[in-house]
Amino acid sequence: MTHILLQIKFKPEDEGGRAQLPLRGPWCPHLVVASQGEMLGVRIFDIPADARPGVPVEVLAELLYEGVSYDILAEGAEVEVQEGPKVVATGIVIAGAG
């Protein structure tokens, strides 16, 4: 599987973010590039233990699906991190798939 490096910032709960950050085990949100709208499935394993809303953190994301083009997740792409329709974080691709 291919991976990308992201810098993400979780939204505070009062702005629609999660009540608790996903600090344990794999987390499988979707990434959406704002200008495109396509939801791309990823798996994130290691969110830093000191992560908190509003503070950027770097994470490694595994691109889950073979046969799906992740090329849009190129370096510099701005993304929303979604759980279903809910945007729980925003970020930027530091090292991309394209």
Image (cartoon, rainbow, N blue to C red):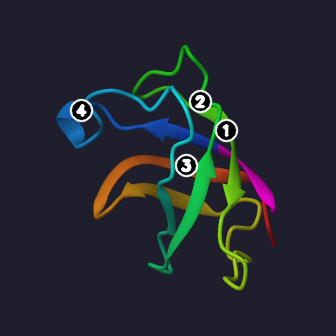
Residue depth check, mark 3 versus mark 1: number of the one nearer the observer: 1
Give how far apart the Cα atoms at labels 3 and 1 are.
10 Å
Tell me where residue 7 sits by quadrant: top right
Q: Which residues are magenta?
A: 1-6
Residue occupying the far top of the picture: 50
Q: CA distance from mark 4 to mark 2?
A: 17 Å
Residue 16 visible within the image: yes
Dot 4 or dot 2: first in sequence order is 4
Which residue bears the numbered disc 2? 47
Estimate how packed mark 1 is, as few (under 14), some (14 to 19) or many (20 or more) residues with alpha carbons within 10 Å.
some
Which is more N-terminal, label 2 or label 1? 2
Between tags 3 and 2, which lies in front?
Answer: 2
The numbered mark, 3 or 2, whose residue comes first in the sequence reads: 2
Which residue is at 59% across, 30% downward? 47
- Separation of marks 3 and 2 at Cα, in angstroms: 14 Å
44 to 83, vertically: above or below:
above
Q: Earlier in the sequence, mark 1 or mark 4?
A: 4
How much space separates mark 4 and mark 3, taking CA atoms? Answer: 17 Å
Q: Against 68, is 62 above or below?
A: above
Which quadrant of the figure contains the C terminus?
A: bottom right
- Residue at image mark 1: 59
Disc 1/disc 4 C-alpha distance (Å): 20 Å
The CA span between labels 1 and 2 is: 6 Å
Amino acid type, residue under disc 3 in the picture: Gly
Badge 4 is on which residue? Answer: 13
